[in-house]
Image (cartoon, rainbow, N blue to C red):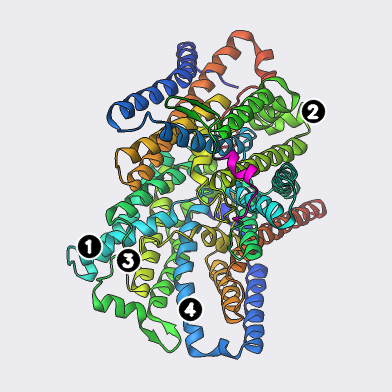
Amino acid sequence: MRAATTVNRPRGRGFGPEWSWLAGIVVLECAVLALLEPSFLTQFNLYVVLRGVAVTLLVAFAQLVVLAIGQLNLSVGAIGGLVAVCTGGLMEVWGMPTLPAVVLGLLLGTAAGFINGALTARTGINGFVITLATASAFTGITIGLNNAEPFYDLPARYVAFGQAQLGPIPAIGFVTLLVVLGLAFFFGRVVMGRQILAVGGNARAAALSGIPVDRVVIAAHALSGFLAAVAAILLMARLGSAQPSIGSDWLLPSFAIPIVGGVALAGGGAPVLTTVLAAFLIALIDNGLVLTKADPYWIQFLLGAIILGAVGLNRLRTVAESRDARRLGVAG
Amino acid sequence: MSMPGCSRCRTGCRVARATRLLDRLGLFAVIFLFWTAFVSFADGFLSGVTIFGLSRGIAITVVIGLAQMIVLSIGQMNLAIGAIGGMVGVATGWLMQVVGLPVWLAVGVGLAIGAVTGWLNGWLVTRTGINSFVVTLGMGSVVTGLVFILTRAEAFRDLPRAYTQFGKVRLVEIGWFEISPLFVVALAVTGAVALLYRGTVLGRRLLATGANERAARLSGVPVDQVVRTAHALSGLLAGLAGIMLVSRLGSALPSVGEDWLLPSFAAPIVGGTLLSGGAVAVVGTLLGAVLIDSVSVGLTLLNVPSFWIQLFVGLVLLLAVLLDRARTVAIAHGRAGAAGAMGPAAATGSAEAATPGAAR
């Protein structure tokens, strides 16, 4: 395990400043919104922001775990849609109680991710194209299962859970919180989590240190599918119906949030905490646009601009860091 | 570089030659099989209406596929093809309807907008060294956002007749063989791109950059300039596809290009373009587009629900990348064999040929 720790150390150094930067921006956003729009601080609005974050954060994590091994997953949304329709179908058509249906839905998402991982690892083909193809296949099944119709007849208690709130905090937010803690623990303390970071940092070095690279790649993709399934199941509870369109607009946020959170696209890092802050940063911009009744299309424009800006900044920082490192090397 | 065992290279050579032959013949054979099946079982497949619709559909898919293929040839990708196509389509419609420019000028300006946007992608990639995936993902989102903000999701429907007729008339009409002029445009573009890769310095440089960027740079290829040119050409073709689709639809909808991501990769990859860069299949992209569009139209005529078609396209793409992988391995073996036979000079001088796997 020493190899994995070494691989991860350089990224740990830049973590502090990045964390405070993002937190600062989020606080600033809150202050500006509170001053400009009195309705921002109402309990209902805070609830709306939090329930949005509860789902998009999981979508971002589904991408983050694959980015951590230096790959991409274009099928996060397609898996979400597939899980939603299948879980909804189990509940409505087969009358399955909530718990087994949800468990089967989570298994399905994991299995879909496993297929992505197995195809990528076994063939060595770029994960981009594999997941582009499987996304099309998954979406085809999603639309076909119920002829693009949603399932509306979900168990009352399940839907009630999706609407429940504790003050401004939505009940589904606690599930997301659990996932945040779980992921932080997974990447910090669990062998498989460390191995994912090691493979992302340098797959060859990881293989030479005895890490089963193929198995790690498959695990990362399966975890990605699992997280997409959790997102879909929470969103379904919130909407009160299993829409086949669930996941169709996840592609952009799934990349935007981890990138703003400072993930290295080359792999090797999984900054869970900054990803959480980034999800808030983007959700607050979205909320600001809604509150000021701006054109909803601005969010798409801004998300794109934020992606370009964030990667540009990351790049600048990397260049500056390597210059610092070189100077230190000369001095020492 | 270590050479694999001699027997292995000889097999590799044979496999490489076989897969190359299979690429050409195989795709023809697959298309032929599907056409035979559709002609026999799908009522009305071989009718004027169907063939005309197919010629229009294929025309647009080919241009989209070539737009992606050019960027794939340098080992990068362009996720903004649909966004650029939509923007250029809407901008051209606006120039004709609101500004009142003549058709040729509006189309010229539209193509220029596409090329400039593509160039901007390339500039961002070369200036920042960021992955083309992220740059074009961000750029695509910015462009689509802008289009919807500026048009308020309204279409331009009052376009000059000369322009909309181009997408509606039949150029050739012999029995069931009815061909749209759009298809001729696509053939001309395919020919031009084939010439670019066969006969020009730029074409060789694109392939050299895709095969091994470092080697290309060391051999004096202006890699940054080549990357920017590739993205600009990709934007130009994406814009052309947008203009063609608007002419076919008869109105400039902002939703043009929304569903281009999958076909843009499927056509060149099914056609045999390497994902890792350095090798292209121009005619293959045309055949890939013919296959994808024929299958969608044929299955629709057979009353197969549309979701099966989406599933099918996904599976075809998956199969194609698996073949791509086999082909890459085979070429690597073949090249290793050839290098062994011709000595080290052949190995060093072949930066302009396919060196797969460098950027994977």
Disc 3 versus disc 4: distance between alpha carbons? 21 Å
- Residue A269 visible, this angle: yes
Residue A84: x and y in percent read 33, 62
Q: How many residues crowd around disc 1 within 10 Å: few (fewer than 14), some, or many (20 or more)?
A: many
Disc 2 versus disc 4: distance between alpha carbons? 54 Å
Residue A271: x and y in percent read 55, 63
Image mark 2: chain: B
Q: Nearer the viewer, mark 1 or mark 4?
A: 1
Disc 2 versus disc 1: distance between alpha carbons? 62 Å
For the residue labelled by badge 1, is the local secondary structure a helix, a strand or a loop?
Answer: helix
**Same chain, labels 2 and 1:** no
The magenta-colored residue range is B157-167
Proximity of marks 3 and 4: CB atoms separated by less than 8 Å: no
The residue identified by callout 2 is B220
Disc 1 versus disc 4: distance between alpha carbons? 28 Å
Q: Nearer the viewer, mark 2 or mark 1?
A: 1
Locate the C terminus of chain B by quadrant.
top right
The residue identified by callout 4 is A50
Q: Residue at image x 74%, y 42%? A: B108
Left or right placement of residue A297 versus residue B326 in this view: right
Image mark 1: chain: A
Which amino acid type is shown beneath numbered disc 3? Ala
Specify the label residue A90 is tagged with: 1
